Each structure stands twice: as structure tokens, then as C-alpha cells.
Image (cartoon, helix red, strand yellow):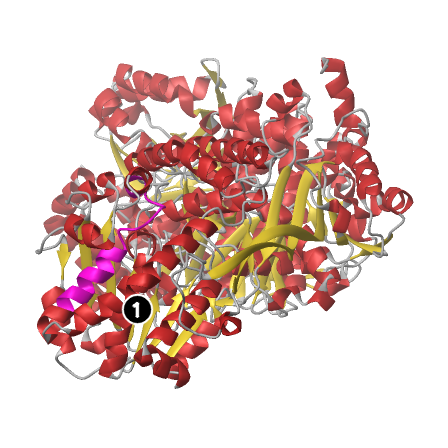
């Protein structure tokens, strides 16, 4: 299909023959509104806002009063009912494709655009003018031009604020080429160096305050223009390919060419370029295209890097982001710019790049048009299921490969509007250095190998569970199969490009799985299991509490901790446990205790914890809970009960949305209500507001303390929280194991994965009981 | 101690005594350990007393007769030559004595004779060596000897052949220490030693640059003022050169534009640092011009540039925004993307070589201006002196620099130029002066092609003579001829 002639033509004129993959591109177009378009020199970026209808599992308490008693009858009737409802959430779609397909794409959009209350399309970029008439004709939308730089800055602020691991450092020769940066709580001030045809250097001080402090005419256009003259090569990416094969030392005059070695008295090394193109002035000889392209690339990258450093120094800025078509995902230019910045600042300033740099203009233009929706008031999250990763087979790259395949290539970014605004936990010791994840799989090849294998192995089980959760729906199997393919594809991508979505972590692998499940309408595959477990556990609650009350204080404290840990063994997320549970459903709470490692535990701070309990009670404890059933009801609640009796207020933080068998906020509300009905201590605490339930803002089996519900943060601050308890493998081991808090903290988990246990120096079902007190000086500040 | 040193210098007879006692030792130290740390330190110390020394020199020039005697007595043996080993060319200066007496002729050793004959009887050496006859300075009196100064150049890659010749003709038997500068003095030092058994006295270029700039400004008292700037640089009609008084020069930013560019911040005579540099310099201009237009010399490139129009090659702000980009205060005439129009095939086909040369010149010059301005801001310095061979006969670039600095700094920064801009190499002498101040005296002769004159800056009987010659290499690139002749007394 793709004849050489055909592709050649495609690169020069609009290609209308191509068929778009409708399931994959321009998704959710039916409800799309608020369009924005950014047309660059070769790529078009389209943005729109859409509402996504998807199923959510809701839980609702039965009306027990009708039966004349609060007491739950043991007649097998479940505790609460589960209903699957349609929910509408907002999503941002960004698509990038080649300009040659713009007409095809506009036609496609026109055909699929049902809701047409939209009247205008915001446009930015150099091509916005050129394609204005075409857009207006095709879409019947008025084109409203927005300033390019304003859009760029707005987009940049947006991605920096909403996408963790957006920025990265590029290190060509390191083990992992991409080193992602933590999201800094305060993104301002920063320097944005946009390398288009020329260079603009912009200082951004706040959302609305920015200034173009300088620029240079030597930019991408110089590389392209001068490169085309010197090498007779027309295309930008072909020039870059030439450059990556060349030897600049054949064309440039180096310090050692003049001095024979280093120029010691000035600290100039011999390999330094003394004069770019200095050798081409003398010899009559021919220079290879590759060598000239390389020399040109060095000349321009060094020059831009030098100017960027001079501006950064003058304005005292250390965060410098690079963008523009010259940079856009090209490892060659990222490398030369990084090299230049390192050389000129001696490592004081790092060159930072952005994963979604190509979308900044489109995002900004979109935000300009969506101001009435207040997009900046919400928190947004990258949807891993709907986004192509960094360095995907995007239209930016691999021109040769693209020419051969003749397929329509595109790159997507989708962002979900989160229901709640997310903020830092106020108790983080240093929010700017907080890293949620314990192991960065991007850097740890061995761990990466294992976890990718592990998730791939577990995929069958997840598919089975998903189908089982929707027995009544015949097409569930088909959807589950699609889920399997999508997630397996993501895993394959990550195997080859671990950096595709920022740092690869166990958390990101889990989150990606959740996103993919949601994508195919499996909102909560564990809802029924959770319901059954909660039901069962509730029956034992009073018995457990009673037996605990009979123990001495010392015995009771130990039993409470063991109960907490035993409850944590029940976890459908961990493969070892799901195996046991599948084969032996009678595996009970008591038996779980027998599985636990005897003291001394793998990490054992129990004695210190007991000593602390002998002291004054804590003011308020924040408890991040984990699983449903035994864990929350027989493990967490008795423990919480003891704290309440001691005079400590308790805030229970649970997930906003479902993830594996983790108890969700809405489930916990019902569970708490039921327990309160049985237990006067809990009832009184709820009534007096000493026991509070908050949602974490997350739908992940892991926990990112830098992205928590704003209400949670407020409650934590108001209550004077002085103890944080984090439970479970996902929240206390995969994440937050090394998190430093400004108050006392308890991190406890049972390691239900033998590989991880071994890595930590233990065996399966090893216990981690980590009690930490911040050092005095840190606590005071 | 310094005062003592100068005191000795001043007393003609005392000096002779000094020589007898300290001379041989010093010679040894210069010859055997030209780069020793100790020598460098004594140089630094000595350098502190510069101005006082200069006053001395003037009073010294009166005792002409004494000088002549001393000249004869301390005249170094032939051959007199020096070299500048650059990245591309080696520049050799040779003084041919014309007043050789019959007696001398007899005494002259065979090797010396053969050198003299070989150098003066040819205008070409091998395939690539050339004697620039048009630059020759006939009838020059140097050190009481009348003679002719020859300028010879050959490509640096022929240096091994030169050294081979030096060995064949027994240079080393003449106990000559060569004074050499340029990067090649470092690069080929070992080759000189091993192949030709010659010792090089190396002189650091940048280290001396500073003193040279200040020196030249202080010694030029007649004729047009040395330092000048362009008044009204943004208005071509009213733009003109104006004298600038560099009496209180500090702090100043010194931008030396050679093949590459070095930017130095000078806080006092002895306190300066290299702020930064860029590889986009004169070499880049010429290199790119050669590739783009097929020209081969700097003069051709400049000539073409003067006839071209860069706006056909560059993409201007107005090409993108239709006019000024007011939001950011960018005027429509500003270059948005150098060579930006060349991204488009039709435009590539429509530009002339002259346009390309002009665009290259404008790109390189503006970039130097831009980096310089940022350095000036970072270092908080308002005066910028531009020097270097890129600017020689390159009024276009000088005016561009003046314009760019004035416009983008809103008049805060001033671009200064030197009439003898290349003469900063006088600094080379200063290095030697300071090194040897306590025991030697120095003569500086300077030839400046701009004003076409040779003037004695210092006149005093010397054991050590430093000759510095700067010239145009009309055939190739603008070249600086720097020659340092060192006599060591036997």
C-alpha cells in the first residue's frame, strides 16, 4: 500500500487517502467541546474537552430500620448492596499528528462531532493562520487565535502542576537515559527556553506573570536553514540523523589543534571547540555532510546552552526547561543541550526536558478557551490507559520507519479531571525531596525484570476476576480480553521503554492496570468479594473485641498489633495470597496469625512503640487503611478502638475510588456505621467527632503523600495530627517506606511476595513494623 | 626591592656591573627553565611597579650615546628571528643584516651563512612556504644594525619539515632560544626540542592581552586617539567615530575575537579572569563562508559580505508577525531566526553568495554582541573593549557590535575599539619585561600596518630585545605577525 511515490507525495501535500483507526484516535468525540488546535511547522496538536461516561460500582446501605432493628441479622443477607451506575467524568484529550493528515482529521472530527454547541476553536502556532480557512470551512467553527508564548507558558504550568514526573534530565550514557524529577510543590520561578526557528528565553514567576527576558536568532531555523545549505538535505529530522553519524572534530578547530593539548592556564581542555567550522576555512578538501551537520549541531546547541546559562545566572534561576521543535523528543539535541549546560554551569544548573513538551501550546490554547470551566481549580491526572508514552512511535520520530510503514501515526495524552483537588500532606518533612516510590524500576533493571514478569503472570487471574465480577453481562468476556491486550501491550512498551510514563514503579504498574480496567468498564472487579469479606468479618467483630478486652495491657497491645498484621495478610492483590484464598476459602483470621513471622520481625520497632504507648496519648492519629474485610474490621478497628480509649482522636483515610480489594471511602462509611451500631466506644467516637472518615483522593493501591485530598490535609492540620499510621504493602513498602514525616509514624505490612521479602532479607510473610520519631531538631521546625 | 630594580635600570654604569654578576645566571634561568614557577612569580611581583617604570624609560631615552655603546657591546649573535605558530599558519620573522663587514663575513659560521642565504634567496620554500616580499621592511635599523626584516609563512602542518631543515642546517649549534607564541608554541614544543634541539620560550597570549591594551593606550600620544567608540550607532547617518579616554579603564570587559572568542573581565592590571568564550568567532565566519560561497580568504569573504543583503537569508520578526512583536518589545527588523529563510527551498534557490556571506557575518557578530552583553550584565561592567583580528578592516562588524550593544542595553553599554587593535600583542613584551625586569632591559619596536609606522616605544640599551611586529597577511587571512626576537648573551 505504501509505495515510495505515495509516501513522498504524502509529505508534500495533504493526504486524504488514509483511514483513521476510530477506536483509538479522537476518542469520546461525541461529547467533545472546547476545541483548541496548535499547528506547528510539521505537526498538528488538537485538544478537546470531553465527558466520559463509565460505570462505577456504588454501595448503598440497606434500610435496616424497616426491619425494626439495627442489629444485623445473620440470615445471609448482605450488609450493603452494590449497584453499578453510570458516572460522568471530565477528560482532556490531546492528539498529535502530522500536518499532512489535517484534512482527513478535520473530516473525521466533523463526522463524529455530535454535540455542536461549540462555536469557536482556539488556535495557536505558526500554522494556525495557514489552515484557518480550512478549519472554519470543515468544522464550522470560528478560529480564535491565541498568542503562542502565552499558550506555551500556560501549558507548561499545567503539566508541571498536574503530571508527576513530567520533567526529566537526559543522560545519554547513564543506565537510564531519563531521570525524572519530583514534582516540586512550588513550580515557580523557572526559565523556559523555547527553541523554535529562533530562541525565546522566558522567565516565569507565577501563573500570570512571565517575561521574555531574552532570546537568540541562532536556533532550530539556523540548524535547519544552514544545514540545508551545507548538506543539501531538506528535512529537519534527516539533518539530525546526519548529525548523529558525523564527527565534528573534522570540521571544528579544537583547542588541541592549536595548543597540542589542553590550554592549562585557562582550564580549557584539549577537546574543547576553539572555533566552530575553523577547519573548513583552510583546507580545499571536501567535508562530509555528516561531519558538517554534527559540527553545526554542536555550534548551535552550545550557543543556546551558553546563553541560557547566562540568563539563568543573571536572574538567579536554577530550573531551566527546554522545549520547541529543536528539542522535541530528539535524543540527539537533548544530549547536546545537556552537555552544553553542564559545561557552562559546571553542573550547577541542570537542563530539564518535559515529557509532554509538544503539547504545551495546545494545552495552553485549550486552557485559554476553557477559562469558564476553571480547569485550574481542579487537579488532573494522566490517564495511562489513554496516553502514548514518551518516545512512543510518535510522529516526531523515526521518519524512515514512518515512511516505510505508511501508517497513520499519532500520539495521545489524556488527562482525567479528578473529583477532588490534591495537595501535599502537611506532615511531610520536606515536600520538595519527597519521593513516594521505594524502588525506581527505571534504574533497577533486576527489579524491573521481576515486576514486569510478575504483572504479566498475574494478568490471567485479573482477567478471570474481571469477568467473574460481571457474570450477568455476556459481553464482559470480550471486554476483559480487550483489557488483557491493552495491558499486555503497555507492559511490553514498558519493557522496552521503562521511562515511557515517567519513572517506572510498582505503583505506576498497578495504576496503569487500574486505568486499563476502567477503560473497559471494569470499575471494581472486587466489589462482590469485598462485600462478602466485610460481611463475614463483621460477624466476628464483637468476639474479637471481647477476647482482646480479657487480655492484660501488655498482651493486648501485642495482640492488637498482631491482629493488624494478620488482617493485612488478606490481600487479593498479592499473588501468593490469592492462590491460598482461591484454594482454601476457610483460611481464617486465626490461621493468618499463624502464618505471621514470629518476633523478632524483619523490621522490628515493637519495643519502642510499646514504650511510647506507656507515655501520654497522641493527640490525633491519621490512619491510611488498606484492605476490606478482616483487615479493616478485625485488624484496624480494634486497634483504632484502643487509640480512642487512650484519648487519641483518629482520622481514617481510605481510597476515593476502588483499587483491588482496598476498602473505599463509601464502603468504609457503611462498615463504620455497622460497627458503631455494635460497639458503644466507636459509636460515641463517631458522635463526638473523635473518629473521622476522610477520603485520600486516590484510587491506587499505593499512596502518594504529595497528592492527597485537600479536605484530608485540612483535617490533619486542624486536628493537630501527631501520629501517622500507614498500613499494607502498597502504601508502606512499595511506597513511603523511606518517607520522612515531621511527626511520629508507624509503617506496618506483611510482605506477601517472596521475591520482595528476599530482597529485604526475609521470607514470605515477613513482618515490617517500622516506628519512627523525627529527630528533635527536625520536629521543632 | 622593586625600587632597587628600577634604580639599577636607570644607572647606566651600574647596570653594566649588574650584568657581570647576575647576567649568566639569569640567562640560564631563562633558557633552561623558561616556564618555571619561580620565574613566573618574580614576574608577577615585578609587574606591580609598571607606571613607575614607564616614567623611567622616558628619562632614559636621553642618553643616546651610552645606548649605542651598550648596543654594540650587548648585541646578541645572529640569527635574529622569531615565530608565531598558529592553528593554521606559522609566521616566521627573520632579520637579515645588510651591513655585514668583511670581517664578519669571515667569522660567520657556515650554518648561519646557509640559513641567511637560504631564507633570503628564495621567495618560496618547498611547495607551501612563502616569503611575503610586499611586507618586507627594508632598511630597518635594529640594535645598531641595518638590515631587512623578512616575513615568511608556511602551513602549520609543514612544521615537521621545517624542523627537519633546522636540524640539517645545525640551528642548535647557534645556541639559539626561540621565542615563540601562538598555540603551536605549546603543541610543538617537544618537537622543537627532540627534532631540532631548540629550546622554545613560550608566551601566553591571553595573559598578556590585558597589559597590552592598557599599554598601547598609554604610549600612543600623537595622532588620532587610540581608543574610540561609535557615536549614534543606531543612526547610520550620524554614526561616527569618537575618541574615548581610557584613563580609568577598570573595570572593563575585554572581548578578543580571533578564530574563537575569549571574554575577559579586567578589574585591575593584575586582576582579571576569563569569563567565558565562544567557538563562534572569526574562524566560524570564514569557515562557513568558504563552505557556502567557495571563497578562500577573509578579505574575499568580507568583500562579499559588504555587497550582500542578510535579510534575504534571515527570518526577521516582521516576517513572522508582520511587524513588531509588541507583546515582547521585539522590533520588526530584529532577526528572529538566523538563516531561517533557508529552511524553504525556493528561498534557498534565490539568494546570492553575497547574501549568504553577509548573513554569516551578521549572525556571528550579533551572537558575539549578545553573549558579550550578557557577560557585561552578569559582571556588572559597562565598558567593553573589542579586539582581535576578526575586526581588522571589518568596519561592518564593529558598527554592528556598537549598534547591538547600544540598542539591546538601551544605551547602558558602550562598545570600544582600538585603532591599533591588534597591537595588543605588545603585551608579549610586557611578559618578558616583567620576567626579566631586574636584570634586563627591553626594547620594543612596533610596526603597525594601519598607521604604517615603526616607532620605538622603549629605547634603552638591552641585553634582551623583544621585537614585535604586526602585519597584514594580504594573501590569505588577516594574520597577525608576531615575532619576538630573543638574544641571549653568550
Q: Position of residue A334 (x, y in %)?
A: 50, 41
- Which quarter of the rendered picture does the C terminus of chain B lie within? top left
Residue B345 seen in render: yes
**Considering only vertical position in the picture, is B413 above or below B443?**
below
Q: What stretch is highlighted in magenta?
A: A557-577
**Considering only vertical position in the picture, is A611 above or below A684?**
above
Q: In this view, does A230 lie to the left or right of A205?
A: right
Residue placed most toward the observer, A75 or B307? A75
Q: Position of residue A175 (x, y in %)?
A: 34, 36
Please name the residue shown 38% across and 45% down the image: A505
Label total for image: 1
Work out which residue is located at the far bottom of the displayed protein and give it: A688
Residue placed most toward the observer, B161 or B116? B161
- Residue labelled with disc 1: A637
Q: In this view, does A323 lie to the left or right of A498?
A: right
| Residue A158, image quadrant | bottom right
Q: Position of residue B317 (x, y in %)?
A: 75, 52
Identify the chain of the residue marked 1, using the numbered disc in the image.
A
Looking at the magenta stretch, what is its main secondary structure?
helix
| Residue A368, image quadrant | bottom right
| Residue A557, image quadrant | bottom left
Please name the residue shown 47% across and 43% down the image: A513
Residue A292 seen in render: no
Within 10 angstroms of label 1, few (less than 14), some, or many (20 or more) residues? many
Amino acid at each position: 500500500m505504501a509505495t515510495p511515490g505515495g509516501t513522498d507525495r504524502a509529505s508534500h501535500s495533504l493526504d486524504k487517502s488514509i483511514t483513521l483507526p476510530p477506536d483509538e484516535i479522537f476518542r469520546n468525540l461525541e461529547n467533545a467541546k472546547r476545541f483548541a488546535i496548535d499547528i506547528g511547522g510539521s505537526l498538528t496538536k488538537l485538544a478537546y474537552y470531553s465527558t466520559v461516561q463509565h460505570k462505577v460500582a456504588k454501595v448503598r446501605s440497606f434500610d435496616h430500620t424497616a426491619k425494626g432493628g439495627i442489629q444485623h441479622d445473620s440470615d445471609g443477607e448482605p450488609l450493603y448492596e452494590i449497584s453499578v451506575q453510570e458516572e460522568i467524568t471530565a477528560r482532556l484529550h490531546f492528539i498529535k499528528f502530522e500536518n499532512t493528515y489535517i484534512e482527513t482529521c478535520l473530516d473525521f472530527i466533523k463526522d463524529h462531532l455530535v454535540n455542536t454547541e461549540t462555536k469557536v476553536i482556539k488556535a495557536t502556532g505558526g500554522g494556525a493562520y495557514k489552515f484557518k480557512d480550512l478549519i472554519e470551512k470543515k468544522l464550522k467553527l470560528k478560529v480564535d487565535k491565541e498568542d503562542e508564548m502565552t499558550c506555551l507558558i500556560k501549558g507548561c504550568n499545567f503539566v508541571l502542576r498536574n503530571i508527576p514526573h513530567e520533567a526529566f534530565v537526559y543522560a545519554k550514557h547513564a543506565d537510564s537515559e531519563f531521570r525524572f524529577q519530583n514534582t516540586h510543590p512550588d513550580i515557580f520561578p523557572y526559565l523556559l527556553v523555547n527553541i523554535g526557528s529562533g530562541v525565546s528565553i522566558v522567565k516565569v514567576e507565577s501563573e500570570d506573570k512571565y517575561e521574555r527576558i531574552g532570546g537568540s536568532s541562532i536556533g532550530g531555523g539556523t540548524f535547519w536553514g544552514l544545514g540545508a545549505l551545507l548538506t543539501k538535505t531538506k528535512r529537519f529530522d534527516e539533518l539530525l540523523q546526519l548529525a548523529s553519524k558525523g564527527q565534528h572534530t573534522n570540521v571544528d578547530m579544537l583547542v588541541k589543534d592549536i595548543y597540542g593539548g589542553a590550554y592549562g592556564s585557562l582550564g580549557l581542555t584539549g577537546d574543547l571547540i576553539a572555533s566552530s567550522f575553523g577547519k573548513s576555512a583552510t583546507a580545499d578538501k571536501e567535508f562530509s555532510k555528516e561531519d558538517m551537520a554534527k559540527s553545526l549541531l554542536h555550534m548551535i546547541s552550545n550557543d543556546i546552552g551558553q546563553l541560557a546559562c547566562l540568563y539563568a545566572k543573571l536572574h538567579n534561576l536554577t530550573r531551566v526547561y527546554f522545549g520547541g521543535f529543536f528539542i522535541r523528543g530528539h535524543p540527539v539535541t537533548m544530549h547536546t543541550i545537556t552537555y552544553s549546560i553542564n559545561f557552562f554551569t559546571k553542573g550547577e544548573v541542570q537542563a530539564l526536558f518535559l515529557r509532554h513538551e509538544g503539547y504545551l501550546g495546545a494545552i495552553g490554547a485549550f486552557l485559554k478557551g476553557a477559562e469558564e470551566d476553571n480547569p485550574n481549580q481542579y487537579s488532573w491526572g494522566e490517564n495511562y490507559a489513554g496516553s502514548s508514552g514518551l518516545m512512543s512511535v510518535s510522529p516526531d520520530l523515526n521518519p524512515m520507519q514512518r515512511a516505510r510503514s505508511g501508517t497513520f501515526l499519532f500520539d495521545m495524552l489524556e488527562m482525567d479531571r479528578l473529583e477532588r483537588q490534591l495537595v501535599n500532606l502537611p506532615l511531610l518533612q520536606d515536600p520538595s525531596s519527597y519521593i513516594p516510590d521505594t524502588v525506581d524500576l527505571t534504574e533497577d533493571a533486576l527489579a524491573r525484570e521481576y515486576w514486569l514478569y510478575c504483572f504479566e503472570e498475574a494478568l490471567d487471574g485479573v482477567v478471570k476476576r474481571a469477568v467473574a465480577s460481571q457474570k450477568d453481562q455476556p459481553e464482559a468476556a470480550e471486554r476483559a480480553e480487550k483489557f488483557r491486550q491493552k495491558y499486555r501491550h503497555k507492559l511490553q512498551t514498558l519493557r522496552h521503554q521503562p521511562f515511557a510514563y515517567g519513572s517506572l514503579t510498582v505503583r505506576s504498574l498497578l495504576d496503569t492496570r487500574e486505568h486499563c480496567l476502567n477503560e473497559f468498564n471494569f470499575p471494581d472487579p472486587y466489589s462482590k468479594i469485598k462485600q462478602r469479606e466485610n460481611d463475614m468479618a463483621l460477624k466476628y467483630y464483637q468476639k474479637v473485641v471481647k477476647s482482646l478486652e480479657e487480655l492484660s495491657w501488655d498482651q493486648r497491645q501485642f495482640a492488637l498489633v498482631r491482629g493488624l498484621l494478620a488482617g493485612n495478610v488478606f490481600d487479593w492483590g498479592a499473588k501468593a495470597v490469592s492462590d491460598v484464598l482461591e484454594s482454601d476459602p476457610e483460611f481464617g483470621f486465626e490461621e493468618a496469625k499463624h502464618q505471621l513471622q514470629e518476633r523478632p520481625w524483619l523490621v522490628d520497632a515493637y519495643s519502642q512503640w510499646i514504650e511510647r504507648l506507656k507515655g501520654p496519648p497522641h493527640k490525633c492519629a491519621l490512619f491510611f487503611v488498606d484492605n476490606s474485610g478482616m483487615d479493616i474490621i478485625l485488624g484496624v478497628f480494634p486497634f483504632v478502638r484502643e487509640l480512642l480509649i487512650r484519648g487519641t482522636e483518629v482520622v481514617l483515610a481510605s481510597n476515593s475510588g476502588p483499587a483491588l480489594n482496598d476498602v473505599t471511602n463509601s464502603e468504609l462509611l457503611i462498615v463504620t456505621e455497622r460497627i458503631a451500631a455494635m460497639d458503644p466506644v466507636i459509636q460515641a467516637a463517631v458522635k463526638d467527632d473523635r473518629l473521622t472518615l476522610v477520603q485520600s483522593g486516590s484510587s491506587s493501591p499505593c499512596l502518594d503523600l504529595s497528592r492527597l485530598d485537600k479536605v484530608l490535609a485540612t483535617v490533619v492540620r486542624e486536628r493537630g495530627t501527631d501520629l501517622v499510621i500507614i498500613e499494607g504493602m502498597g502504601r508502606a513498602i512499595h511506597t513511603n517506606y523511606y518517607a520522612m514525616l515531621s511527626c511520629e509514624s508507624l509503617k506496618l505490612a506483611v510482605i506477601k511476595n517472596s521475591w520482595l521479602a528476599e530482597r529485604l532479607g526475609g521470607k514470605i510473610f515477613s513482618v515490617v513494623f517500622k516506628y519512627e520519631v523525627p529527630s528533635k531538631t527536625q520536629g521543632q521546625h | 626591592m622593586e625600587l632597587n630594580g628600577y634604580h639599577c635600570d636607570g644607572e647606566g654604569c651600574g647596570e653594566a656591573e649588574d650584568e657581570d654578576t647576575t647576567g649568566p645566571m639569569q640567562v640560564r634561568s631563562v633558557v633552561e627553565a623558561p616556564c618555571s614557577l619561580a620565574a613566573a612569580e618574580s614576574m608577577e611581583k615585578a609587574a606591580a611597579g609598571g607606571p613607575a617604570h614607564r616614567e623611567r624609560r622616558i628619562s632614559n631615552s636621553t642618553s643616546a650615546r651610552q645606548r649605542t655603546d651598550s648596543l654594540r657591546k650587548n648585541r646578541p649573535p645572529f640569527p635574529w628571528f622569531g615565530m608565531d605558530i598558529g592553528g593554521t599558519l606559522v609566521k616566521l620573522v627573520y632579520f637579515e643584516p645588510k651591513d655585514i663587514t668583511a670581517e664578519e663575513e669571515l667569522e660567520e659560521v657556515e650554518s648561519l651563512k646557509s640559513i641567511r642565504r637560504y631564507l633570503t634567496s628564495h621567495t618560496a620554500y618547498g611547495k607551501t612556504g612563502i616569503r611575503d616580499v610586499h611586507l618586507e621592511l627594508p632598511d630597518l635599523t635594529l640594535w645598531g644594525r641595518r638590515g631587512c626584516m623578512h616575513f615568511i609563512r608556511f602551513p602549520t602542518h609543514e612544521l615537521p619539515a621545517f624542523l627537519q631543515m633546522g636540524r640539517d642546517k645545525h640551528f642548535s649549534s647557534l645556541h639559539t632560544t626561540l621565542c615563540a607564541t601562538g598555540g603551536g608554541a605549546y603543541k610543538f614544543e617537544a618537537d622543537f626540542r627532540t627534532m631540532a634541539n631548540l629550546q622554545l620560550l613560550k608566551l601566553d597570549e591571553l595573559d598578556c592581552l590585558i597589559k597590552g591594551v592598557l599599554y598601547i593606550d598609554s604610549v600612543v600620544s600623537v595622532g588620532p586617539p587610540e581608543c574610540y567608540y561609535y557615536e549614534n550607532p543606531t543612526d547610520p547617518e550620524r554614526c561616527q567615530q569618537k575618541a574615548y579616554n581610557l584613563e580609568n579603564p577598570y573595570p572593563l570587559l575585554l572581548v578578543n575575537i580571533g578564530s574563537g572568542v575569549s571574554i575577559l573581565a579586567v578589574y585591575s592590571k593584575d586582576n582579571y579572569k576569563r569569563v567565558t568564550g565562544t567557538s563562534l568567532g572569526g574562524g566560524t565566519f570564514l569557515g562557513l563562508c568558504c563552505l557556502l560561497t567557495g571563497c578562500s580568504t577573509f578579505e574575499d569573504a568580507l568583500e562579499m559580505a559588504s555587497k550582500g543583503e542578510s535579510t534575504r537569508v534571515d527570518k526577521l520578526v516582521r516576517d513572522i508577525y508582520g511587524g513588531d512583536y509588541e507583546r515582547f518589545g521585539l522590533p520588526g527588523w530584529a532577526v528572529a531566526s538566523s538563516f531561517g529563510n533557508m529552511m524553504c527551498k525556493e528561498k534557498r534557490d534565490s539568494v546570492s553568495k553575497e547574501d549568504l556571506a553577509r548573513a554569516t557575518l551578521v549572525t556571528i557578530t550579533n551572537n558575539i554582541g549578545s553573549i558579550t552583553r550578557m557577560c557585561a550584565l552578569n559582571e556588572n561592567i559597562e565598558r567593553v573593549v573589542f579586539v582581535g583580528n576578526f575586526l581588522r578592516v571589518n568596519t561592518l562588524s564593529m558598527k554592528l557590535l556598537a549598534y547591538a550593544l547600544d540598542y539591546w542595553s538601551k544605551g547602558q553599554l558602550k562598545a570600544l575599539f582600538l585603532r591599533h587593535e591588534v597591537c595588543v600583542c605588545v603585551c608579549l613584551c610586557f611578559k618578558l619585561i616583567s620576567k626579566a625586569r631586574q636584570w634586563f632591559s627591553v626594547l620594543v619596536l612596533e610596526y603597525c600596518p594601519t598607521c604604517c609606522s615603526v616607532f620605538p616605544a622603549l629605547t634603552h640599551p638591552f641585553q634582551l630585545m623583544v621585537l614585535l611586529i604586526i602585519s597584514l597577511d594580504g594573501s590569505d587571512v588577516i594574520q597577525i605577525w608576531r615575532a619576538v626576537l630573543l638574544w641571549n648573551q653568550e
